[in-house]
Structures are given as structure tokens and as C-alpha cells.
Amino acid sequence: MRKRTPAAALLAATLSALTLATALIACNKGSGSDPEPGSKATADSSQAKPGSGARARDFETLDVCSFVPVAAVAEVLGHDPATGSAKATMGRYATDCTYSFEAGEGFSDYAMVWVYPPELWAPDMKTDIESVAGLGDRANLEAPTTPGSFARMNVLLEGELYVETRANKPEQARALAELALERLVGER
């Protein structure tokens, strides 16, 4: 397990919180309702674009934490599930779950799973992003670039959804993406 200094852990937590807050503000713009905690996702054909063949999802009620529980994420990250917690945030255009695990000596490890409509697929075109074959219709992996930053995996299932996962290591981000896809749509 990678040890972090208190300053690095604080920086990582602060950056994660800022990234999450920015995403939530953007995703919830125009959404005037608060979903019921623990509610399940339902398909709503009225949201699908005509002729798209897409299965629409109601992101305001899609609770990623209920589909991808703490125990499953703990297994991927190599943590004791009893030390973990999860917090779901659901918005009009995206939903996510942020997982936190005690990592000893006052430190925490974090992982995140976001789910978006497939139309929002527009991964960054940086040189440090690697295309990944065999996962979804399109996938890419961005390795951490600075201490305390996360590896990020983006996977598109055309007509279904776009999943983004973040974890400390690239192999963890990929394993979380595989887990999320399996739990959300039964595919890898």
C-alpha cells in the first residue's frame, strides 16, 4: 500500500473534492429535484432520442453506490470493507459514487465511479492517455501525472452509457470500470 504524507493526503482529498464539486455543479444545473436516497435506476423511454436505439437512464435516481457496493470496491482496492464508506450524488446528467477507505494512521484511500449518458463522451485528448482494447465500444486510460492524482479510466458503451472511474493505480481504475459495467449493464 502506498503511504502518503499528511500534506499529500490533504492535497489529494482537496483536489478530489474540487473536481467532484465542479462536476456536480455542471451536472445539476437546471435540476430542481432532489432524488430519494437509495432509489434504483429505471429506464424511461420518454428520455431516449427518437431513432437513437439508446436505452435512456434516469440519472436523478440512478444510485451507483447501490449497483457497485463498498464491499465490491474494497475487494478491487485491497481494503477491508468494514473500513469503507460510499456517498452517492445523483444529478440530471450524471450520477456518481465516491468511496473512502481508512488506510491507517489517519490516511484514507479514495475511488470514484461516475456514470454519464453516452452523448457526453468526449475524453481529453492528452498525450498521456492510452487507448484500451477489449472494454466497451471505446475506452482509454490516463495514468496519474502528479503525486496524489488518480488514474482515470473512461469507457463508452454506445447507446447505453459512459463510465469514468478513478483510483490510485491504473489497474485499479480499469478493474473498477469492469466491475461498474458488469453491475450496471451486465457487460465488460
Image (cartoon, grey):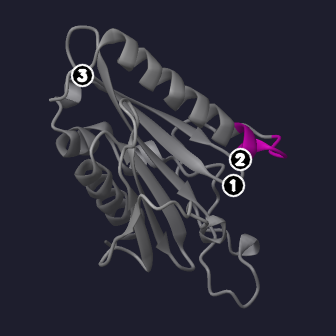
Label 1: state its secondary structure. Answer: loop
Can you give x and y, in whole percent of width and height, for residue 40 in the image? 52, 51
Q: Residue at x 47, y 55 (%)?
A: 164
Quadrant (top left/top right/bottom left/bottom right) for the N terminus: top left
Task: Pick whichever, 44 or 81, lies toward us.
Answer: 81
Residue 27 covered by magenta stretch:
yes
**Is 184 placed left or right of 73 in the picture?**
right
Residue highlighted by disc 1? 93
Residue 131 position by quadrant: bottom left
Q: Residue at x 43, y 15 (%)?
A: 10
Q: Which of the labelled discs sits on residue 83, or is there none?
A: 3
Q: Residue at x 34, y 10 (%)?
A: 6
**Is 74 placed left or right of 173 in the picture?**
left
Label 1 with label 3: CB-CB less than 8 Å: no
Q: Which of the labelled discs sits on residue 82, or is there none?
A: none
Label 2 with label 1: CB-CB less than 8 Å: yes
Q: The disc labelled 3 sits on which kind of residue? A: Thr
Task: Pick whichever, 157 or 5, lies toward us.
Answer: 5
Instruction: Say few, some or many: other residues with alpha carbon within 10 Å of mark 1 (under 14 / 14 to 19 / 20 or more).
Output: many
Between marks 2 and 3, how big is the CA–CA gap? 29 Å
Residue at the limit of the structure toward the bottom, as seen here = 51
* Magenta stretch, residue numbers: 25-32
Mark 2 vs mark 3: which is more N-terminal? 2
Between circles 2 and 3, the one closer to the viewer is 2
Q: Which of the labelled discs sits on residue 27, or is there none?
A: 2
Give above or below for 73 relative to 106.
Answer: below
Mark 1 vs mark 3: which is more N-terminal? 3
